[in-house]
Image (cartoon, helix red, strand yellow):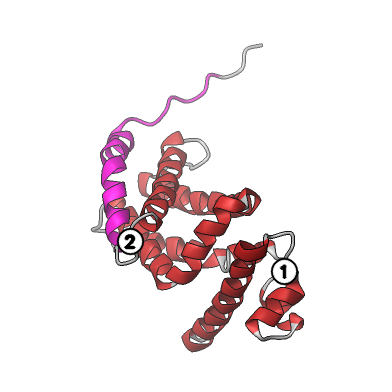
Amino acid sequence: MSDLRSRKKHRTRIALAVAALRLFEERGFDETTIDDIAAAADVAPRTFHRYFGSKEDVFLVDPERKLEIIRTELGNRPTSEALLAGIRRTLRAIATDYAADEVFVRLQYRVGLREPKLVAHGYVYQVRWEDAIAEAVAADLGVDATADVRARVTAHVTVSAARSAVSAWLAQPAETDAATVMDATFDLVEPALAVLLAGPPPPAPSPPRG
């Protein structure tokens, strides 16, 4: 898909999601139908189904988009760039992507406070972000991501920091720069991650007796 087509598709998805979230905020999630969303967005219901599989999906808009950012930024990291510098740059790219859709993200945040089940829906995809980060960390360390806990812990901490940074950004005035907040948040966890990654690998498990 061309960049132009991709951007156009994303804008359409955002427009549908914003219409849906405004209705969720006004009426509640359960009280809003797909027909209501389509009418608010001035499209046919079939157009909604072309972009989303369910009402829950509008809360996420495009979960693959953030995953692609992680894979692209970490996968194309220059060999001269330190791992944590690459992770920081990746988080800044994610923050910039959030800021590009700020109207949607702020609605998403407010609706999430009222509809926690929608937030839980999003956590499923954040596990995939952690998987992608853990794979990149393991590749850098030259270890197995499933056997060396340093990769998985780094991924957990990174995604938690990103989630906290986005929440902090949304709690501040609209003119606040999302990437700056992300940087400041990563500053808090980077020293601990540096110690973790510089340490020895975990000991191999003892063979079973018997």
The circle on residue 155 is none
Q: Alpha-carbon neighbours of circle 2 within 10 Å: few (<14), some, or many (≥20)?
A: few
Q: Nearer the viewer, residue 153 or 45?
A: 45
- Residue wearing tag 1: 53
Q: Is residue 122 above or below residue 25?
A: above
Residue range highlighted in magenta: 177-206
Q: Quadrant of the C terminus?
A: top right
Q: Is residue 73 above or below residue 189?
A: below
Image marks 1 and 2: residues in contact by CB distance under 8 Å = no
Q: Quadrant of the N terminus?
A: bottom right
- Residue wearing tag 2: 173
Residue 121 locus on image (x, y percent): 63, 53
Residue at the extreme top? 210
**Magenta span main SS:** helix
In this orientation, does residue 33 appear?
yes
Instruction: Choose the circle earlier in sequence order: 1 or 2.
Output: 1
Q: Is residue 91 left or right of residue 33?
A: left
Q: Amino acid at mark 1?
A: Gly
Residue 76 position by quadrant: bottom left
- Gap in angstroms between the C-alphas marked 1 and 2: 33 Å
Q: Amino acid at mark 2?
A: Pro
Q: How many marks?
A: 2
Q: Is residue 49 above or below residue 136?
A: below
Q: Nearer the viewer, residue 85 or 22?
A: 22
